[in-house]
Every structure is written in structure tokens, then in C-alpha cells.
Amino acid sequence: MSHQSCLLLATLAMAEQEFRVYVSKDYLKFNAAHFIAYQGFREALHGHNYRVSVQVEGRLGVQGYVLDFGIVKDTARRVCKRLDEKTLIPARSDCLTIREDGTQVVVRYESDEFRFPKSDVLLLPIVHTSAEELAQYVLGEIRRELAAGGITGLDALEVGVAETTGQAAYCRERL
Ligand code: ZN
């Protein structure tokens, strides 16, 4: 085999390699209240100690990283902090009506009404607060923060949200 062919094969082999970094830490968590609601069904208000994991796929940069672990951890931690100790309400729900009344948020499902202090509630741009849609929301927030920090060129992002040990939902997006 010629030297040139060897180089070509080496290049092809490298092109097939994929890299990803994965972060799952004790502090990547948020404690929040929620209830699942859809037409004809509503859970009682309850809470979880949610845990978040993040996977980033991409090529190796000149420094040998897909993305510095520190950046992944700091970004995910900021997003978790915004969700922590809140009642999560899905603003795009097709069965809840949500309105503001002075310093309160009023959420109605059929004849049931909840009133929360505004500062205790986070209205999220999702339809249900399932682990799947929370993972979708967290992924969007992490994507937005990375882009705002000038980080580009990643191949995919995946976020896991676990409601409890061994019970997680994942959302993956190609970038
Ligand atoms: Zn739940």
C-alpha cells in the first residue's frame, strides 16, 4: 500500500470516530412541585427531587475536548437553579387556564383552582410537566446558554431528567 493510501485510510478511520462528554453530578438537581394534567386527567400536586444529566456530542477541538466539562457543569447548574424550589406550570397546557391576579398566579383545571404566589411559580413553555417535556425544556435552555456563550460546532445535545432513581426521560437534539 502506498504511503498516500495509508494516509487516506487513516483519515477515513478518524472521520468515523465520534466523541461525547457526559455529565451527571449530585448537584445537578432541582426540587420542584408539579402535576401532570391532560384532557380528562389530573394528578394531585406533588414534588420530585429531579436529577439532570447532560451529554454533548461533537468533534475534538484543538485542545482535545468536545467541550470543557466545566462549561457543561456550570451551564446545567444555572438551569437547575432556576427550576429549584418552584411549582412548575406548563403554560402551553390544553386543559389548564392560567391567569395572574395581583401577586398570585391562578391555575384552573375544570372546577379545581390553585393559587400560588407569583414568585413560587415558574411558567414553562411546554404542554405537560412530564419528565420528557422537562428534559426538552432543559435542553433548550442549555442550548441557548451555550450559544449565548459563543459555543458553536457541536453535533448533538442530550438531556436526561430523572424523577427518581432509575426513572428518567431523555431528549436528544441534533444541532
Ligand atoms: Zn410527578
Image (cartoon, grey):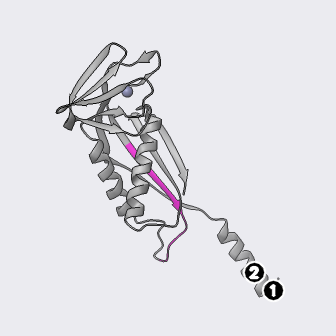
**Contact? badges 2 and 1 (CB < 8 Å):** yes
Given residues 73 and 118, the one toward you in this image is 118
Which residue is situated farthest in the left direction here? 103
Magenta-tinted stretch: 52-62
Residue at (37, 34) in percent of width and height: 91
Residue with the mark numbered 1: 2
Q: Amino acid at mark 1?
A: Ser
Q: Position of residue 145 (x, y in %)?
A: 37, 58
Q: Is residue 69 visible?
A: no
- Classify the position of the C terminus by image quarter: bottom right
Residue at (32, 43) in percent of width and height: 29
55 relative to 97, above or below: below
36 sits to left or right of 118: right
Q: Position of residue 104 (x, y in %)?
A: 20, 30
**Disc assigned to residue 15:** none
Q: Amino acid at mark 2?
A: Cys
Question: Mark 1: which secondary structure?
Answer: loop
30 relative to 16, above or below: above
Q: Quadrant of ligand 1?
A: top left
Question: Mark 2: which secondary structure?
Answer: helix
Q: Position of residue 65 (x, y in %)?
A: 47, 69
**Disc assigned to residue 6:** 2
Q: How many marks?
A: 2
23 relative to 67, above or below: above
Which residue is situated farthest in the right direction here? 1
- Classify the position of the N terminus by image quarter: bottom right
Q: Is residue 9 magenta?
A: no
Q: Is residue 29 visible?
A: yes
Q: How dense is the environment of label 2, judged by Cα within 10 Å: few (below 14), some, or many (20 and up)?
A: few
Q: Please, what is the dominant secondary structure of the magenta stretch? A: strand
